Image (tube, grey):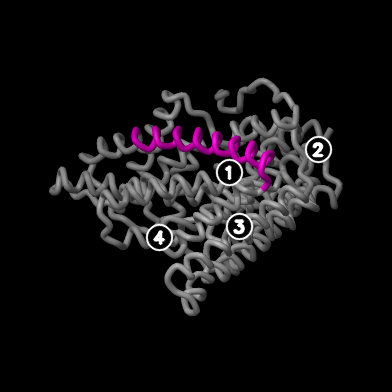
């Protein structure tokens, strides 16, 4: 009877619900702990180029940095391919597949491989985000909890979603966006019940508490910007059209690069990650703003005075290094690199608006912040998450209205251009490689396919 009530989403078993909430909190705390340690270690390691500069200079410095990043990329790719092939890339698509019953979360091998190979990849300077590994590790922690406490299949799927939300909350210190990500991005796979829905919330809260205890409170990208005049809303709508197109091009580039990297791997093993590592390592010395996940780059660009042409050139380089890094087969996400790319585009766009209408009160920083949500939306196709994530990351709540305009427009433009959600396409590619035919699209609780 209790399972029937649970399946209908009705609270009918207080002891069972209390047990499940406790498991969700445990999952969130584990995800927050693992993810926070993951972040702290990467932060410590990423200072190595500056330490290297104390002992070398000139082309010797460039060559040494390139060799270090190349070695880390090849080692990370080797560990992934040898021990846990599903640990490569973001991992979000793996969790969506597992929630749908099409993939298996082998947490015993995913957790260590994602953790250590992820540290090697991100710590080497590759253009990857920390959120992909923390989401995958959070869901892996959930799989461990579900197995240890012998939960039902419905509860296991709910805990996977809770662990994924906890991983995202930890990555960006953004619990609301994490919950909305599960609701909007996994609305076809998530088992909507009273118990599982509340479990996602409790897990995100627990992960955020642990993250703030270990890493501090406050937004990860404090970029407060004053509100903009209503007269500038057409400019933000135009920005949405621009980043909508960029998002579609980005997704297609990633998919083609992933296919190219896989094909080259069959012919010449590890040549592709080695080449990407050499490029990124050299850029760590020659043009540091063009590499790494991009969080510090965003803060630096927002506080600088780089010209429009330079911003566009930097954005183009980061586009290439991001696509190359993700397709190299090492663990890493795309959220943070997307935000950094969007900051380049938004600052350039805002600079142009400022030049054309100097009296309108346009600030390039405001356009940079709004572009982050817009490009995220165009790629992931989750506009509500794009708005919430940007607001929680930057603390710029006065930009809520322009953010909504840009994200909605970017989503519409991506749809018109034939774009599809990046994780849906990555999951389909993974299933096709494994010889699994995905089920036909289902209608989610909102009536959207």
Q: Which residue is mark 3?
A: 121
Q: Is residue 19 visible?
A: no
Q: Is residue 318 toward the left or the right of residue 359 in the image?
A: right
Of the two numbered discs 2 and 4 in the rendering, the one whose residue sits closer to the viewer? 4
In this view, the residue in front, 99 or 202, is 99
Spatial CA distance of label 3 from label 4 is: 19 Å
Task: Identify the mark nearer the N-term, 2 or 4.
Answer: 2
Query: Looking at the image, which residue is at 67% across and 35% down?
Result: 190
In this view, the residue in front, 256 or 232, is 256
| Residue 116 shown in magenta | no
Spatial CA distance of label 2 from label 1 is: 33 Å
Residue 408 appears at what percent x and percent y?
A: 40, 33
Magenta span main SS:
helix
Q: Which mark is residue 35?
A: none
Q: Quadrant of the N terminus?
A: top right
Spatial CA distance of label 2 from label 4 is: 49 Å
Q: Secondary structure at mark 2?
A: helix
**Magenta residues?**
241-269
Q: Which residue is mark 1?
A: 327
**Is disc 4 in contact with disc 1, using a CB cutoff of under 8 Å?**
no
Q: Which residue is mark 2?
A: 153
Task: Identify the mark nearer the N-term, 4 or 1.
Answer: 4
Q: Which residue is mark 4?
A: 287
**Is disc 3 in contact with disc 4, using a CB cutoff of under 8 Å?**
no
Of the two numbered discs 2 and 3 in the rendering, the one whose residue sits closer to the viewer? 3
Q: Is residue 131 toward the left or the right of residue 366 in the image?
A: right
Task: Identify the mark nearer the N-term, 2 or 3.
Answer: 3
């Amino acid at each position: 009877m209790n399972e029937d009530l649970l399946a209908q989403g009705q609270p009918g078993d207080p002891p069972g619900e209390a047990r499940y909430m406790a498991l969700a909190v445990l999952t969130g705390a584990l995800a927050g702990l693992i993810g926070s340690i993951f972040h702290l270690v990467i932060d410590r390691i990423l200072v190595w180029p500056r330490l290297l500069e104390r002992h070398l200079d000139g082309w010797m410095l460039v060559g040494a940095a390139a060799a270090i990043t190349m070695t880390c990329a090849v080692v990370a790719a080797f560990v992934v391919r040898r021990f846990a092939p599903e640990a490569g890339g973001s991992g979000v698509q793996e969790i969506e597949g597992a929630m749908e019953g099409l993939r298996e979360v082998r947490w015993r091998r995913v957790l260590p491989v994602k953790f250590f190979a992820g540290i090697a990849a991100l710590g080497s300077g590759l253009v990857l985000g920390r959120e992909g590994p923390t989401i995958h590790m959070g869901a892996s922690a959930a799989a461990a909890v579900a197995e240890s406490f012998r939960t039902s299949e419905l509860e296991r799927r709910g805990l996977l979603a809770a662990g994924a939300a906890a991983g995202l909350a930890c990555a960006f210190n953004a619990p609301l966006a994490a919950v909305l990500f599960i609701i909007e991005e996994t609305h076809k796979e998530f088992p909507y019940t009273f118990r599982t829905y509340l479990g996602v919330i409790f897990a995100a809260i627990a992960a955020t508490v642990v993250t703030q205890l270990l890493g501090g409170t406050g937004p990860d990208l404090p970029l407060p910007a004053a509100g903009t005049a209503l007269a500038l809303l057409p400019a933000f709508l135009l920005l949405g059209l621009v980043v909508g197109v960029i998002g579609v091009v980005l997704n297609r580039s990633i998919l083609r690069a992933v296919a190219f990297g896989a094909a080259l791997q069959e012919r010449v093993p590890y040549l592709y990650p080695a080449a990407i590592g050499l490029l990124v390592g050299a850029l760590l010395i020659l043009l540091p703003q063009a590499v790494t996940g991009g969080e510090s780059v965003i803060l630096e660009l927002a506080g600088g005075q780089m010209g429009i042409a330079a911003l566009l050139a930097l954005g183009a380089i980061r586009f290439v290094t991001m696509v190359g890094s993700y397709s190299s087969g090492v663990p890493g996400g795309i959220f943070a690199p997307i935000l950094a790319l969007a900051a380049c585009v938004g600052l350039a766009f805002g600079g142009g608006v400022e030049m054309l209408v100097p009296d309108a009160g346009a600030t390039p920083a405001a356009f940079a912040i709004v572009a982050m949500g817009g490009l995220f939306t165009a790629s992931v196709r989750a506009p509500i998450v794009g708005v919430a994530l940007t607001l929680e990351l930057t603390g710029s709540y006065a930009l809520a209205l322009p953010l909504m305009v840009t994200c909605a427009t970017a989503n519409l433009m991506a749809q018109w251009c034939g774009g599809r959600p990046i994780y849906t396409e990555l999951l389909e590619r993974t299933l096709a490689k494994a010889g699994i035919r995905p089920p036909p699209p289902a209608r989610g609780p909102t009536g959207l396919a």
